[in-house]
Structures are given as structure tokens and as C-alpha cells.
Image: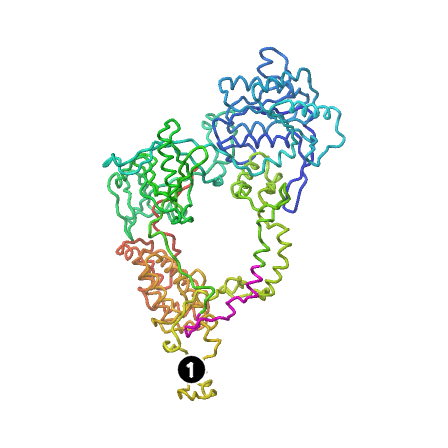
Amino acid sequence: MFLVDVSSSMDKIRRVEVPGPQGPVIIEMTNLMWSLQYVMLKIQEMVGRTVHLPTKPAATIFNGRKTDQCGVILFGTEGTNNIINAEHGGYEHVTELIPVQQPNHSTLSKLAALEASSVVGDPIDALIVGIEVQDRVLEKKRTWTRKIVLLTDGESPMEVEDWQATVEKMNGLSTGLTVVGIDFDDDDLPFHEEDKSNIKKENESFYKEFTEALQQGVVGNCDYALSEISRPDVKQVKSAMLSTVLRIGDTEARDEEAIEIQIKTSKATALARPKSWKRFARRKPMKEEDEDAMDEDEPMSTFAQLRMRTDYILDRDKGEKPEAVKSEENEDEMDLAVIPKEELVRGYKYGASFAPAPDGGFPRLETRKGIDICGFFQQKNFRREMAMGEVSYIWGDPTMPMQQVALSGLVQGMYQKGAMAIARWVSRDNMDPKMGVLYPCPFQDADALMWVQVAKNVLQMPFADDVRNYSFASLETLVNKKGEVVKEHPYLPTEEQMDAMEAFVDAMDLSDAGEKNEEGEREPWFDTRLSYNPAIHRTKQALFHGAVVPDLNTHPLPPPHPELLKYFEPPRRVLKRARRAIEDVKKAFNVREVPKKARVRKDEHKRVEDEDDEMLLLDAKPGPSATQRRPQTVSPQSKAKEKTKAKAKPVSADSGSETEEEPEDEELLLGAAPTRPREGEEGSVYIDPKRAPGRIVGESYPLRDFKKNVARGDVVSKAVEDLGVVIKTVVTKPFVSRRTAEMLECMDELRKVALEEDEIDAWNEFIQDLRDICMSGKRGAKDFWDAVRGVGRPLSFITSSEASKAGGKSQIAESEAAMVRLGFLSPIVHPSNLHSTQFIQQ
């Protein structure tokens, strides 16, 4: 029950500091409007529906449990409306605004519309009415928790005679009382109101005496309560126990060798996610008959939630079934027919075609409810990173002692042997099974198993194909081109650097960076029990705040609670302790700030390179020795330079050869610049320096990289995209004429793969973008486009007729492609043939 004071004193104006774009802003509001935020925030945790306030869009809020019910009683109202006054008289100026019920969409609206009256009310009268109303509602619900919240400024006079009887009544009903006082003094807080009236002083003293006499009573400051209500909290929920059976062996074929144990399961951990955001739009004008049918108590909002609708359409002009309408402008010009979903056949994509599913779909796997143990293995062989799912407890049935004994024997045996079990869980008959592991947990009072669903997204055990092992080059062992291990190198740390880094890691230790305990010893700084998910709690705070304030422009969202930001910054004590170690690390590693380089993009805009744009070649593999290396291809200019250097060098007396010895610096594999081997040459390591980060096709040998990745089969779309990017990049560079033939060969291969692998849309978009780039570029790019037009049909758009022969679809007609080749038309290519069209409706 919420008892709200609406007396005339609650109309007092107060100045409240709120965050603004340029810093804190002071706004004015009444004490009633300010304090009602606490009541609305408490009620909002109970509501589980969409709230439509008349002054702002709808806001979705939390929980929605049927056992969360509340009522609101006002005291200090102009009139009187309560059950005690109706039956016995008295208890004036007390009004029951909202009866005890589960909060609905209008509860917050009624609270937001409250205004202070011109009279005063007695809080004790309201308290007695609240106790009576609550007792009548919960007469047959003895296990429910009873709470009363009294919100007041303490300026109203009240009758305090026989208050001990009220205390006895509340203690007998186990009713708790929380008094939230506006500007009340608090010994734990540095707040004391100046120029306080005598009535308020006496009332505060009475409230403290009254709550101390209760078994469950507390008096608090409203300002402190509003700050604490945004504190992150973890709600402890008691999981419902579900019945199932644990089986060992085949109980159907060999029941004499199998065991069945009746068990109960309950959740130990559950995944928590932030509330999803919903989209809203301005509501369309309603018809008169719809307005008359609406509930008068339900406030009308000008916004409505957007919902998705799926329509399947058929283009009768082409005889095909496009998967999406091109645009709203072209929709009226197309002869479209909406196909009912019942007339469609479900199919599964297989390559470039669709395989229709049989009538009724594929038969489901016949499964039986229960948990079947498939086998046992040693705990030391369990990879801890596989346990990524939720955890559940498995108990023996509490009503069957023998079943508890049987499960306890299994748990004790697994625990003594250090074993775990692989199990198969089916929640209901004919449901999809889940694979997981069972871990023995012998607790003090009972023995149980812990079920852990393993793997990543689908919460199932991974197959052998799902586990991939990646090998990386050693960071401690470097090999030069002769196959020798290098002991000293700029990439290898020295003893001084190792000592400096070790001291830095020790200085940043957080195990003793927390507060001191009772014994004077410092505790760890990080506590997982006090580390909250910012996404969950900040989203909750934003939703709650948006639903209780009248306008977000005048009442912006306050900053997060300090408890939520507790672990965002390292402790100052550790930073101060590590200051010397940081300087030693900078000196040992010669750390200095590197100015960012500006590079010119193809659109002639400059962008500053990030620090990680240049990649170190630490993942290179050792190549063959100097005697096993094959000759490398070099340019004529490089040959001329080498001949000049060779003439200046003395001839080796041992071999008589004029080949100069390689400098020691160039023999280091990671220190020398990468050389460019011949295409297809084996035995030499080459890392393309012109391959952009995140790309699988480089600019040095794009065709070779493209064919290599297409042969893999799982990165075809990525390879098509990257080759298109490489071609568009090369044609914008100077001297593109030298690579014209190479780029035309790449385009020919790209078009061939796009047609065969159902990447038709990607090719058509690429050829359109390439034309736009070439026509708006320099002379060399325009000449390259003339070369593409000279090839003709083999490098033009993929038309609908050509695509249909290959099992794909295209929106480009043969006539449009011909006009493009002549240079008269430049159509905009839209995404073609999506399977369904998504519309938005209110």
C-alpha cells in the first residue's frame, strides 16, 4: 500500500538539479511531483505491460508478476472516500485512489496527474485505512508479504493518541512500514534542513519512535531514497522444480541392466539480458466508431508500437516470384499479386536452387522425456571453456527417500572417482535433445548433480568439426633465412625488458588494492558479486526514468549510479604504486608517441592512419635455407642496380662467383623486407603488403588469391566482395594501363564465379559502381572503362535470362544490358529477389 500526502504543504516549490547538455541545470517543481517519482519507480517494477502516458510515447517496463499487487491511498484530499468512513464515519480527507490490484497501464497515469489540495490530512488516519484495506484483501492469503509506504513532508498535524494499538495491529499482521520523508534529517547523511517548523520536528520524532516499535519499520530521506532506487540490484528468484527421470542404460531393451531414478531439476544460474527496445510511430487518426469503442479510463497516446507483417507477392509480368518490392515508387507500376501463405511450399536452399520439403515437413526425431547418461570420463579431461551455457541442479525427488539414496550413491561414486558424465536431456517427449555434462556436487545436506549445457550459441555439445585448432608462430623463437635460431633481435625482449615488465605486472596487482577489513588487511579490489552488467541496469534506469518524468527535455536522464561505474576505472592506489614501473617500462622499451600519418584516399580526402593499420610480420613461417632458395623475379630496374653493386664488390676468392654475400640484417626472416616470388612458386614465403586488413584478396596477385579462396568453398561471398574492391582500387591508381589486361582477366573470372555461385546481385552492383568510378575519375580510369566496353557482352550485367539458366535471378533485362554497353543507360541496381517483403503496420 502506498499512502501519499497531497496536503496543501506538498505544493511547495523546490529547486532540483538535473543534468543538461552543458552541465547541471536547475529546474523547479513541487514537492508532490518530485516525491511521486519514488512511488512511480517502485510501482513500475511490478508492471509488465506497455504504459501509455498522455504526455509522451509508450514505455515498456518490468516484471509483471501476478503476485505483485499494490494500492494507493491519498490523505489530505478535498473529499473523502474510504471503506471505514462509509461504514463507521470519521477518517475525513482520506481517499482510496487505486484499489489493491496488479498495476496496469493506467496506474502511473493517475499518479502523474495528481495535484496538491487546499486542505490537510491526518497520516495516522490514512495508515489505519491502509491496514484495513490490505487486511481485507489478503484475508485468505496468509503467506503474502505486507508492506506499507508512507510518503509525506511531515507538515500536517496528526492525532497520535493510542498509537501503540496501531503498532500491535501491524506487528500481529507482520506488516512492514517505510516512511519516506521529504527533507527529513538523516544521521547517516550530511543533510539537515534549516528553518524547520516545530510541527515537522515533532512529526519526525514521532515517526522514528513509531517505526522503532515495529518489527519491520524504517524512516528515510526522500532524496536518498531516489538515489538508492537507481542502485543496481540482483533479484534472487527461487526456481520452480520440475520432475523428470535420470536413466543409466537402455531401460527398454535391457531393463534388468538399466537404472531409472526419479529426480527434480531446478536452475542454478540463468542468463539475464537487457530489455529489448521497441519502435514507435505517430498514430494515424482513428475513426469515430473506434474512438467510441475505447475504454474511457484508458488514456489515448499519439504513438503506437510498430509491428512487422510479411506478405508473399508474385510479379505476373515476369512470371517470377520476386522476394521484395523494388521501391514504393515502382510498386504501383508493377503487376503484383499477393500469394496466401497456405499456397506456398516450404523449401530449403541447396546451392543456387531450393529443395522443397515434403508435405508435413521432415519427420521429427522420436525422443523420450528424461536425462540419459551416455558415458563417463575423467574431470581432468573436461575443457573448461566448453561450459558456456546455463547451469541446473539435479536432485533426488524430495518425496521419495529411496530415489534420493540412489542419486546420492551415483554422486558419491562419481566424486570419488573424479568422473563426469556426458548426458542427453529431453525436456518433453519428441522434443529436440540437448547434450551436456553432469558434474557431481556433494553438498552438506544433500547430494546433487550439476547439469552444464556446453558450447556457444545453441547450448549443445560441439561436434569434432566444430572444434578448430589454430597454430601460431612462436613469439620467443625467431629463425633466419638460413634456418638458424636468432638469439638477439629487436623482436626478442632483453633481460632488462623482461624485468621491467615483470615489475609492472606486479605493481598492477589488484589482489590487495581494495579496502581494509576488520583485521587491517587489504582485500581484493574486484568482487564479482558487486560487478553489475551496465547494459542491463542502465537500460532499466533509462526505461524507468522515461516513464515517470513528464518531459525528457526538461527532465533528462540522470547519470548512472556510482555503484554501476565502480570498476570502470582502476584504483588510484594501484596507479600511484605503478607509476615508477610504468616509467621503467617506457625507458626499457623506448616507448614514444608516433605521429599519425595522413594518407590520401581515392576520393582525395585525407584520413589519419590508426596505429594498427601497419601489421608486423610476426606470423611468418620459416622459409628454406639460402642454398635451397630458388631465383626470385625482379624488375629490370632492380637488375640494373644489382649489377652496379656487383661491379663495386670484390669477387669471392672461394667460389669465383660474382654473387655478393647478403648482409646479416637481411638474413633475419622478420627483419628483411618481404620479397615477391613468382606466381605459383613453392617453397618461398610471401606476405602481400598490399592486402588490406580484413581482406582475403590482395592487390599483388588478386586472381591467384581469388581462385584460392573460391576453391575453399566457405568464403565465396567474401572473395567476390574483396576482388571487386581490389579492381575498383587498382583502376583509380596511376599507370592503370599496365594492369588493364590483368584486371580484365580478374573481371572475367569474377563474373563467371558470380554466375555459378549465385552472387549475381554482387556482380551487377560491382559493375555499376565500377562504371561510376571510372567515368568520374582520371583519364586512365576512363580508358579502362572503354576497354571493358570493348570486351562487350562477357563483362556486362548478368541479365534475367542468363541468370535463370544458371538457377539464379536477376532484375536486369537483356535490353537494359545492351543499352549500358552502348553507354546510354545507367540503371540503379536494387537488391533482387528477396524471399519475402517486410511491411510495417501499426
**Which quadrant of the structure image shows residue 172?**
top right
Give how far across and how far down residue 591 sits, in percent. Answer: 58, 64
Vertical relation: 367 (above or below) 204? below
State the residue in front, 339 or 690: 690
Residue furthest to the top: 88
Residue furthest to the left: 253
Give how far across and how far down residue 826 sits, in percent. Answer: 39, 59
State the residue in front, 488 or 315: 488
Residue occupied by mark 1: 639
User: In the rendered structure, which segment of residues is drawn in magenta?
Assistant: 479-502
**Which quadrant of the structure image shows residue 391?**
top left
Q: Please rate how many residues cluster around mark 1, counting C-alpha atoms within 10 Å: few if below 14, some from 14 to 19, many from 20.
A: few
Q: Is residue 491 magenta?
A: yes
Residue furthest to the right: 195
Q: Is residue 676 left or right of residue 364?
A: right
State the residue in front, 77 or 401: 401
Q: Amino acid at mark 1?
A: Lys
Give the residue at x 49% y 41%.
274
Q: Quadrant of the N terminus?
A: top right
Give the residue at x 59% y 39%.
552
Q: Is residue 71 magenta?
A: no
State the residue in front, 303 or 205: 205
Give how far across and how far down residue 415 sits, in percent. Answer: 39, 41
